[in-house]
Amino acid sequence: MDGEENCDHDMFVKIKWKKKETLCVPLKQLKGVDVDDTTNQALNDWVYWNSQGYAF
């Protein structure tokens, strides 16, 4: 599967990696660490939304 097909189904976010680099990862694979309630709810909503098969 190439990157373009994958982008049709996942939302990617940039995260800090090794303190100076960035890495793009699928949002559905992330778990919040020391996040506020709003961020935690957004992560949970995305996982639920994605698990229901919804797409943009």
Image (tube, rainbow, N blue to C red):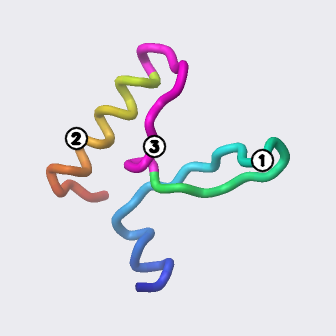
Disc 2 designates what residue?
48
Residue type marked 2: Tyr
How would you rate the neighbour count of disc 2 (Cα within 10 Å): few for under 14, some for 14-19, many for 20 or more? few
Span shown in magenta: 27-38
Q: Residue at x 56, y 49 (%)?
A: 13
Residue type marked 1: Lys
Q: Quadrant of residue 8?
A: bottom left
Disc 3 designates what residue?
30
Q: Residue at x 15, y 50 (%)?
A: 52
Query: Sequence order check: which comes first, mark 3 or mark 1?
Result: 1
Task: Answer with left or right where residue 40 lies relative to residue 35.
Answer: left
- Disc 2 or disc 1, which is closer to the eye? 1
How would you rate the neighbour count of disc 3 (Cα within 10 Å): few for under 14, some for 14-19, many for 20 or more? few
Task: Answer with left or right where residue 33 lies relative to residue 14.
Answer: left
Q: Nearest the camera: 38 or 28?
A: 28
Where 2 falls versus 51 (above or below)?
below
Instruction: Locate residue 37, reporting x and y percent.
Output: 42, 14
Q: Any magenta on residue 51?
A: no
Disc 1 designates what residue?
18
Which element carries disc 3, helix, strand or loop?
loop
For marks 3 and 2, give the CA distance. 13 Å
Instruction: Locate residue 33, reporting x and y percent.
Output: 52, 26
Residue type marked 3: Leu
Instruction: Locate residue 49, reporting x and y percent.
Output: 23, 44
Of the 4 image quadrants, the one containing the C terminus is bottom left
